[in-house]
Amino acid sequence: MTSAAELLKELVSINSVNPDLVPDAAGEGEIASFCAQWLETRGFEVHRLEERKGRPSIVGIAKGRGGGRSLMFNGHIDTVTLAGYDGDPLLAKVEDGKIFGRGSFDMKSGVAAMMVAAANAAKQHLAGDILVACVADEEYASIGTAEVARHFKADAAIVTEPSHLELTLAHKGFVWFDVIVEGRAAHGSRPDIGIDAIAKAGHFLVALEAYGQKLVVGESHPVLRTGSVHASIIRGGEELSSYPASCRISIERRTIPGESGDSVEMELTAILDAIARSVPDFSYRIERGLERVPFEAKTDEAIVACLRKHATQALGRAPKIRGEPFWTDCAILKEAGIPSLLFGADGAGAHAATEWASIESIETLAHILERTAVDFCG
């Protein structure tokens, strides 16, 4: 019987860097084929989803005998860059009870644990189906889970992103905006006709900082605390001898439950309109980019109670409930009508020069997921 730790070592050795993050990177093709074959040899019905060529996701299904609830395990198989890693990022080094390598923590540890858990649970001839979704592209735009959610449904889902064996029931969302401050191009010697868009944009940057400070002391979520905002990129001007015609400021707004892209756009528009009323020749337009909604699970949902019970038994204590400041695929699954939560292994170094996952936590995670599947699916 393959252990989750042994499977993790195999997964780490496969280059699956996201090509949307690193141009011409390997992508998920090889690791998706590995996961598909691993599941097929254990009796799973395997589906390969690849609406975007070269970016496959795998869904393995262990069919139940009927009459039970279905459970989806979800984990992403892409990683961030190998560049800058301390040592060989594709060599799964074992040391001091830890497995090192790119993706060992984020999140091939969770993928290995859920695959082993599903295979072990499926041997017990459950009433409900077990689905194992090994998805592409979580590190960039989550096209994998979005595609899975369009084709497959389940009564509940567990996303196995690393959480230090703590129960994540909420996380923040985000929305991106570009604020374009308009000026008037002119020769640098003609202040009488030129309007400096960069200087005008400075008024917005000052107001944006005040907006961020207001958020920090504003409405608070019990575990996520408050939303936030920051300027990420600024672009403007053509050359030193000209007045800049425009200045584009790209901002990110992190949101908590109850906030949305619409509500944030209203807040930004109010700030910009106030500047326009008080600053001569201030003109702007606003463009909304990618939005990912925040996530929150109810503590009384069946899958939450089920996993908490088995985690408590395995850990000898109730797992801590936490919220995450970052976004995860849980939000996509919930929007698709699948109650979900996040629960994963312990370790450190996501996106860092050294990355590792605790072997003990990986095996504990696999055990908890297996017992949860058996209980939930019946």
Image (cartoon, rainbow, N blue to C red):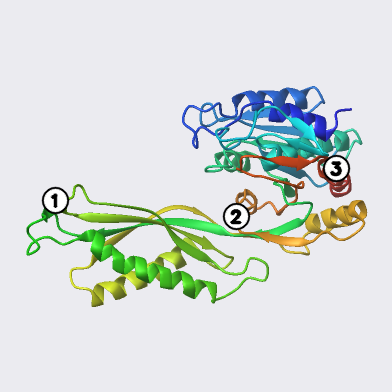
The reply to whether the C-beta atoms of the residues labelled 2 and 1 are less than 8 Å apart is no
Binning the other alpha carbons within 10 Å of mark 1 as few (below 14), some (14 to 19) or many (20 upward) gives few
Q: Of the residues tagged 2 and 1, which is closer to the observer?
A: 1
143 vs 193, nearest the viewer: 193
The image shows residue 130, relative to residue 194, as above or below, that is: above
* Residue 76 spot, x, y in % from top left: 65, 39
* Residue 277 spot, x, y in % from top left: 24, 76
Q: Which residue is mark 1?
A: 241
Residue at 72%, 63% (x, y): give it: 298
The reply to whether the C-beta atoms of the residues labelled 3 and 1 are less than 8 Å apart is no
Q: Is residue 86 among the parts visible in the rendering? A: yes
Q: Amino acid at mark 2?
A: Phe
The image shows residue 151, relative to residue 166, as above or below, that is: above
Q: Indicate the quadrant where residue 246 lies.
A: bottom left
Q: Which residue is mark 2?
A: 326
Q: Amino acid at mark 1?
A: Ser
The image shows residue 146, relative to residue 219, as above or below, that is: above
Q: How much space separates mark 3 and mark 2, taking CA atoms?
A: 25 Å
276 vs 231, nearest the viewer: 231
Q: Which residue is mark 3?
A: 360
Q: Amino acid at mark 3?
A: Glu
Position of 286 with respect to 345 (left or right) is left
Binning the other alpha carbons within 10 Å of mark 2 as few (below 14), some (14 to 19) or many (20 upward) gives few
SS under mark 3: helix
Q: Which callout, 2 or 1, points at the residue further toward the start of the chain?
A: 1
Q: Of the residues tagged 3 and 2, which is closer to the observer?
A: 3
Residue at 79%, 57% (x, y): give it: 304
The reply to whether the C-beta atoms of the residues labelled 3 and 2 are less than 8 Å apart is no
* Residue 364 spot, x, y in % from top left: 86, 44
